Image (tube, grey):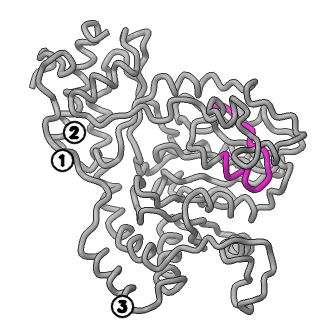
Amino acid sequence: MSTSEQPALLGGPRACDFDWPAWPVHGPAERERLLAVLESGRWWYGEQVRTFERAFAAFQGARFGVSCTNGTTAIEMALRAVGVIEGDEVIVPPYTFIATASAVITVGAVPVFADIDPETLCLDPAAVAERITERTRAIIPVHVGGRMADMAALNALAARHGLAVVEDAAHAWGSQWQGRGAGTLGACGTFSFQVSKNITAGEGGILVTDNAELAELARSFSHCGRREGGAWYDHDWLGSNLRMTEFQAAVLLAQLERLPDQIRRREANARLLERGLAGLPGLRLPRPAPEMTRRSYHMFIFRVDEGELGLSRDRFLDALQAEGVPATEGWYRPLYRNRLFAEAHVGPPHGIRAPLAGKGVDYRAVACPVCERVCREAVWIPHPVLLAEPWQIERLIEAVAKVVTHAARLR
């Protein structure tokens, strides 16, 4: 297929006239493990959960893993375990899912937004430094799409100010920074196993850490405030029921077995994409930090420069989707522009007025210009696409090149 052909949006043939890999995937391993749990009669908090916690922690290179219901509650557990309390401030990026900030509010603290780096798309350490006050207690870097934040700079900054670093690694299963797994470079890291994620049981989450005391606290918070090995009706801390089921753990153990091969395949296809898109006018491929030694690719992200291409990101997406590419805009506004924050939808029982009352927070005044531009320009290609055959990736490259070639006609 030639890029000279009519764009599909204007009536031409689709460049990608085939089905992309489906997600989620499963096989005999999931079925066998699920059946074993079903027949065991032990469906709750048993050997499957313990085995998965150990296996996933080891996969990331951590000593301890504490499973839970989802990635959101994993962040809540982490914040409580590192000592964040009501009134504390926690610095978060605005280019992330709502859970990063809502978990902060849920524990009674105040999310403070700091801008992102235009290359990593993760927290900019310089912007974080400008947001630190005497009330700051923690920083939550989010490893967007599997690319990691500058952990060396953020850890140094946190050490200078006595802050905890909680890594939101919900996109970074298997990503590494100088050979160390995501989630193991701060005080702790949190992961999600929601259905769109690269390893999934529909829902689920986990906290990993090398700190035994922190792991014990997190487990207690997830287990109704009980202490490990204590009496059933003894409750030492205020906790909740955040436990993962045996069924979820069984599925995740099977998913974890195939994850290394999937990571290698996604990395190989991402390299094909990078080579194919490099040099196309109007496209920007953000560069990951050079310290990243492995990227797990929850999505492949590039940016559309409307000034150079003469085509808006949204029109570019319309044309690319017409070619059969399942690309999306991703997070199309910074978190602080969501109605929850921007329009003060903060009153009980539906919002955040109570935890933020009297703290002088006005999110309408927040501005993170790099994030706002990225939200206007980013194109996300989801991770199942990166499990396709190389010839399909080549067709994807042709689709992008065709849209770029005919940008003037597509305005």
The secondary element bearing badge 2 is classed as: helix
Q: Nearer the viewer, mark 2 or mark 3?
A: 3
Does any portion of residue 126 appear in the rendered image?
A: no
* Residue 71 placement: quadrant: bottom right
Is there CB contact under 8 Å for labels 2 and 1?
Answer: yes
| Residues rendered magenta in the picture | 101-116
* Residue 6 placement: quadrant: top left
Q: Which residue is mark 2?
A: 393
Measure the C-alpha gap from mark 2 to mark 1.
7 Å
* Position of residue 137 in the picture relative to residue 39 (left or right): right
Q: Looking at the picture, which amino acid does disc 1 mark? A: Glu
* Position of residue 103 in the picture relative to residue 355 (left or right): left
* Residue 389: numbered disc: 1
Mark 1 crowd level (few <14, some 14–19, many ≥20, 10 Å Cα): few
Q: Which of the two discs, 2 and 3, labels the residue nearer the N terminus? A: 3
- Residue at the image position 75 percent from the left and 24 percent from the top: 365
- The quadrant of the picture occupied by the N terminus is top left
Q: Which residue is mark 3?
A: 39
- The quadrant of the picture occupied by the C terminus is top left
Q: Position of residue 274 (x, y in %)?
A: 32, 34
